[in-house]
Amino acid sequence: MPFRVKVDEDLPTAITQMLNAAGYDVASVYGQGMGGWKDPPLWQAVQTESRFLVTADTSTLRSNPLPKGCDADGGGGSEVFARAVPVTFGSLNR
């Protein structure tokens, strides 16, 4: 099963194309008509679709913390199906 991601509107479409070419199951905020959505409904859509959100918007990361018990907080659970993943343009050149 390919890794499922949603690319936020703050990233160029080239990111969506690059991830798609690499074999990821990619949806984009713009491609789904979600441009301009506020964080809470966008975050709900990301979770409903069981995707990771790829974004450069650090306010999204702060406003959507991971729930207790998820792997990222060391709890060992697996109930997190969506998470905001910070991206910087420098990190794409690796």
Image (spheres, rainbow, N blue to C red):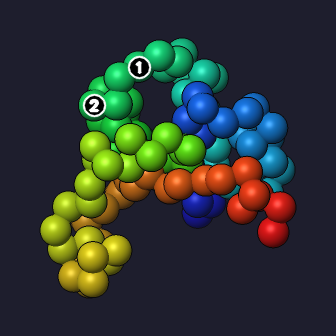
Judged from this view, the residue extending furthest toward the left is 68
- Left or right: residue 84 compared with residue 47: right
Q: Secondary structure at mark 1?
A: loop
Count of numbered marks = 2
**Coordinates of residue 79 in the picture (x, y in percent):** 25, 65
- Which amino acid type is marked by label 1? Trp
Q: Which residue is mark 2?
A: 40
Q: Residues within 10 Å of mark 2 (few under 14, many from 20)?
A: few
**Coordinates of residue 34 in the picture (x, y in percent):** 49, 19
Work out which quarter of the rendered image holds the C terminus and state it. Answer: bottom right
Q: Residues within 10 Å of mark 1 (few under 14, many from 20)?
A: few
Q: What's the distance in space between the residues labelled 2 and 1, CA to CA?
A: 8 Å
- Which amino acid type is marked by label 2? Pro
- Left or right: residue 82 compared with residue 66: right
Above or below for 5 versus 9 = below
* Residue 27 visible in image: no
Above or below for 80 versus 51 = below
- Left or right: residue 80 compared with residue 91: left
Q: Residue at x 54, y 44 (%)?
A: 55
* Residue 66 visible in image: yes
Q: Which residue is mark 1?
A: 37
Say which of 73 and 45 sits in front.
Answer: 73
Say which of 22 and 15 sits in front.
Answer: 15
Work out which quarter of the rendered image holds the N terminus and state it. Answer: bottom right
